[in-house]
Amino acid sequence: MSQIIAEELAKKQKEISVAEFFERNKHILGFGNRTRALITSVKEGVDNALDACEDASILPDIYVEIKNHDDGECIIIVEDNGPGIIKQQIPHIFGRLLYGSRFHAIRQSRGQQGIGISAVVLYGQLTTGKHTKIISKIEQDRPAIITNLVIDTNKNRAEIINTDTIHWDKQNGTRVEVSIIADFKRGKKYVYDYLQSTSIVNPHARITYKEPDGTIHIFERTAEQLPQKAEEIKPHPYGVELGTLIKIAKNTKARQLNSFLKTEFSSMGDRTSNAVIEKAGLDKNINPKDMTRDQFLALHKTFKEIKIMAPSTDCLSPIGETLIKRSLKTETQEISPEFIITSSRPPSVHSGNPFQVEVGLVYGGNLPKEGPVKILRFANRIPLLYQQGDCLITQAISSIDWRRYGLTQPAGKGIPTGPAIFMAHISSTQIPYTSESKEAIADVEEIEDEVKLAFRECARKVQKHINKKVSRVKTREKFDLITRILPEIAKKSAHMLDKPVPSLDPIITKIMDVVWIEDVVEYEKVNRKPVQTTLAQEGAEKPRENVITKSKIMVVNYKRNSQKFNLYAIIPKDAVVGTVTPKPIKITSNYIKWSFDSIPPAEKVDVSFELAGLEKGDFDENDLYVENINPAYVIGADKWEGD
Amino acid sequence: MSQIIAEELAKKQKEISVAEFFERNKHILGFGNRTRALITSVKEGVDNALDACEDASILPDIYVEIKNHDDGECIIIVEDNGPGIIKQQIPHIFGRLLYGSRFHAIRQSRGQQGIGISAVVLYGQLTTGKHTKIISKIEQDRPAIITNLVIDTNKNRAEIINTDTIHWDKQNGTRVEVSIIADFKRGKKYVYDYLQSTSIVNPHARITYKEPDGTIHIFERTAEQLPQKAEEIKPHPYGVELGTLIKIAKNTKARQLNSFLKTEFSSMGDRTSNAVIEKAGLDKNINPKDMTRDQFLALHKTFKEIKIMAPSTDCLSPIGETLIKRSLKTETQEISPEFIITSSRPPSVHSGNPFQVEVGLVYGGNLPKEGPVKILRFANRIPLLYQQGDCLITQAISSIDWRRYGLTQPAGKGIPTGPAIFMAHISSTQIPYTSESKEAIADVEEIEDEVKLAFRECARKVQKHINKKVSRVKTREKFDLITRILPEIAKKSAHMLDKPVPSLDPIITKIMDVVWIEDVVEYEKVNRKPVQTTLAQEGAEKPRENVITKSKIMVVNYKRNSQKFNLYAIIPKDAVVGTVTPKPIKITSNYIKWSFDSIPPAEKVDVSFELAGLEKGDFDENDLYVENINPAYVIGADKWEGD
């Protein structure tokens, strides 16, 4: 009986084509309802366009158009100035799911799954029965190729309706036109938001967006240079799964363990490879293909026990603290927030994939005091709009107690309430999205830890900012009191006693008993071209203001003895240092260091430096540190903890 | 230049094997960290085991064991008494992703993606490098087959290490043994919770669970009968996407439009098919293969304009309100909640797939008054443990204003706070999970609407319950006052005036001016076998108490005139009605109806009925309605709104 059932059941077992799977499970790809379908379609098109341009080192110039019909049908057009796609590849790229160039390459890119754009084609044909039109041109002197196609979901292959050559008034590029059932009315706001956010984290891209009613929005580029290109790297031994290690060994061309480690992994030089092999108790000449599971296990274990250099960050293209701060500043102009603080972590590794976390926090001003804080999430320069609740970024924020920073948070857990915006950007060669719709990041421990560390660092900076403000206000009150009232008393007493007014400096010094550091940042317009920087500001269409940032620091010794100490001023990485007075003893990419041999009591020293390559507001507050002096006696600077 | 780039890029384009895709994206399958990996593995094993048993109409007897090693390696064993798997199918079922019997069948089942168990095999080999061991036996007199396999991720096919026959002391069944890297310490609680919840919604299953330290938990079955078998059906025209319609037409054997509609879709009889064809302006003899896109479009549009019978619910296997109430009662015994209210919606359709929503609400008692309400989510009898934040169920609950029901909710939105448990079960032939890890349901409008309606109905019932309680308490106070104090006054006055004590009935009636209905539910133990019911209670191992539920209703006319009206008592669907007095005029599966010709003022009528087939507490409060009388004059029953 049971045998018959088993055989009956066996007959029903069937292979499922991946296209068929996603056709049925379109919500997994982000097409769960008509609003999301609209946004996902635009998003996949734009992500693809940006990736294509960056691959070819072309400054992206992207055109997005939505046409909306009464019956819920929308036509979505995304056009780029990328390198185009050769004729033979068009059916594969647009007509097959799980096909692409970025899955097997370890470097940061928006697309990584080989699903996105084909999913849009699939959703289009599913809901409207219409094919997708692709125009592609790879060279100025050649005609463009036009292809109309659908996906044969049973086979997961493109079915070409027709293909032809046409004239296209463009040097090179790709244009995709797809009809989908979508809800433009509800989705309108989200599409705009998505394009705006994309433009913020991709300052090198120009995006032109035409709405159904003809309204055109232009998101102008604010940087003329492409972000540093993300180079392809090999997997890093940290976090490589045992099974992956065995698989790599199976496919390697290396015949000896030591050359295997050196050729297949990053950060594995001669010395590290040998150290690993020795510690694992293995023979460096063994052929990896002959190794047993236990030998791989020993090797895998040793990876975690030996210090291996962090992976090269060439494969990553983070946004950078200055640019994040600038974006947040632009974004929150009308809110005039009290402060914006950013923090970025050094690169780390999850499952052999390098990643890096950058965060920012905007506080106060006209931000709504009621309601949960706003959370802006980005991954590989893509804004994440949905599924905030189950995203690792949200979870990391929720796990930190924000109550001491002026935010409300029951029991110190959960999304805090109050006037703040939290922003996080994760760049990685492999973003662990919770699903193919790429809307939330899965709770991978290594990444969560880094996001938490980044926000904690941010929190500490917030705390420092608040402390500094509070202690300055207090000391200033004391200072004002002393400098206003003491001379009055001295004058009156002297007058009464008919004696000369005494010098109050020693007394003031005695009462104050601190080194007082005060600073101010000013901007000076320049009309000349800016000094060469990594992020040039001169936009072709909308010239940006060139400024020299001038920082002036006043150091007064209100202590009774002469003071000898070092002063450090932190500078942004992308800035170029101009005139510095007095002569510093060291300038690095991170800081300027002065050494004061001896400042007598009641004496003042004026310090100043200039920074080029920044916009107004990029650097608006000095971050000062002191060394070789008890920091408890210093107002306006913290203890230098080393580089 | 651009051409060269396009050609260079083309070379990098590659197909991605589905197994390779999920190996890289293991978090999508629910293996994002070591805790989740443990739970997901147990879950996929148990889901598969339950499906296998139900497919073969076998009462599931499932054994789960976890062995935990110090180095983080866990061995997970799941064994069932299902029909077993024939030898040839074992490599496909366990060694290929996107392969299975349930994807193409439209009926409710736990598995629907053909991914689950192979994903566990994949994760096992990825993290431990070890193969999975499968033992399967399909007939008592034959030996079992033992197979050791891994997945060749480049090909998405099983790689068999070895296969052999062995003796297995079991009639038939399947046993899977897989080694994975997991965190038992952290996952322990969740595994137990998952198995407990599974047992609650699968009362017909016995689950034995052995923990690493040897502790054995037995989740005993509480019902000896299998749930109604979910039959396979055809897609329903409502919600079928245009593209799917065209695809079905392409593959149909029908040569004429009307036979096409009748053979390929459910709820399409002769009359409906013809009505659709006529309204769409089509020829009923046209060959579907010859139809144009516009003709399909017309047909597709008409589907939504014509009233088509709801899909057959044979394909669904909901839990049932009684069982939900019983489960919630068992679950919350120690909390002694104030009330438990359930609600279930009629079946509906999303994308051509029937689905049904059942919800429950537990309130008060010792439930924590602080903190968010607890939400229990189930889909096709599977407890959903993760990603609560982005689940449609959570969103539906959050969108309802619960403040008037004694819960706290800022601005009437979001997850309410207070002493309550919300429970929802969605059964469908196709659950739209947000990802392959099957942890949250995507925001499909049709389902969200039904979940909202179900919870609103629940909310109304809560309101009614509260109103009824309040108005009864008030009227009882009045009643007590009148029946205690008036006779005292009458007696005293009569005594003072030396007159006989007058009859107070007319006066009481005048003051009360209501029809008073009061009821009580009692249980009477029976030792005999229960009456045949759809859910027999007699468990083989742990005999359950058989009771007769006795409902006694007292109707008193405290109005000045004789009253003529109908009374309805709602009864649970699974109950069998026994003795009813007085003789009712109608008994359906939903209610008992009495007609009272004339109840004179101050007269009382005793009504009672017996229910078999229920457990103590399944039916603990009468739900009474009246008809043909102004309900404002009735205490203890509401207005009958029709069937």
Image (tube, coloured by chain):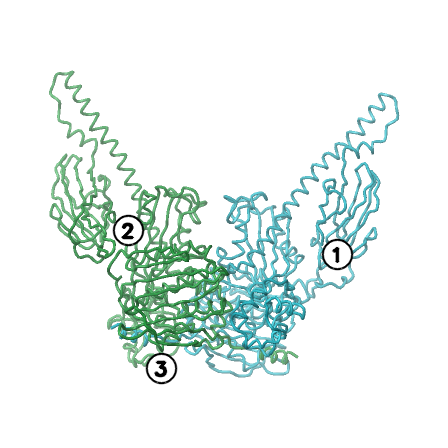
Chain colours: A green, B cyan
Which residue shows up at 13% across the image and 49% down it?
A: A579
According to the picture, the residue beneath numbered tag 2 turns out to be A326
Disc 2 and disc 3 in contact, CB within 8 angstroms = no
Q: Residues within 10 Å of mark 2 (few under 14, many from 20)?
A: some
User: Mark 2 or 3 closer to N-term?
Assistant: 3
Instruction: Note whether A619 is above or below A123 in the view shown.
Output: above
Chain letter for mark 3? A
Alpha carbons under labels 3 and 1: distance apart? 69 Å
Using residue A146 as the reference point, say whether residue B508 is left or right of it.
Answer: right
Q: Nearer the viewer, mark 2 or mark 1?
A: 2
Chain letter for mark 1? B
> Which element carries disc 3, helix, strand or loop?
helix
Residue A442 visible to the viewer: no
- Position of the N terminus of chain B, as image quadrant, is bottom left
Quarter of the image for residue A348 reads: bottom left
Q: Residues within 10 Å of mark 3 (few under 14, many from 20)?
A: few
Counting from the top left corner in percent of width and height, residue A40 is at: 43, 62
Dot 1 amino acid type: Val
What label sits on residue A290 in the rendered view? Answer: 3
Quarter of the image for residue B496 reads: top right
Instruction: Note whether A8 is above or below A535 in the view shown.
Output: below
Dot 2 amino acid type: Arg
According to the picture, the residue beneath numbered tag 1 turns out to be B547
Chain letter for mark 2? A
Q: Check if mark 3 and mark 1 are on a common chain.
A: no
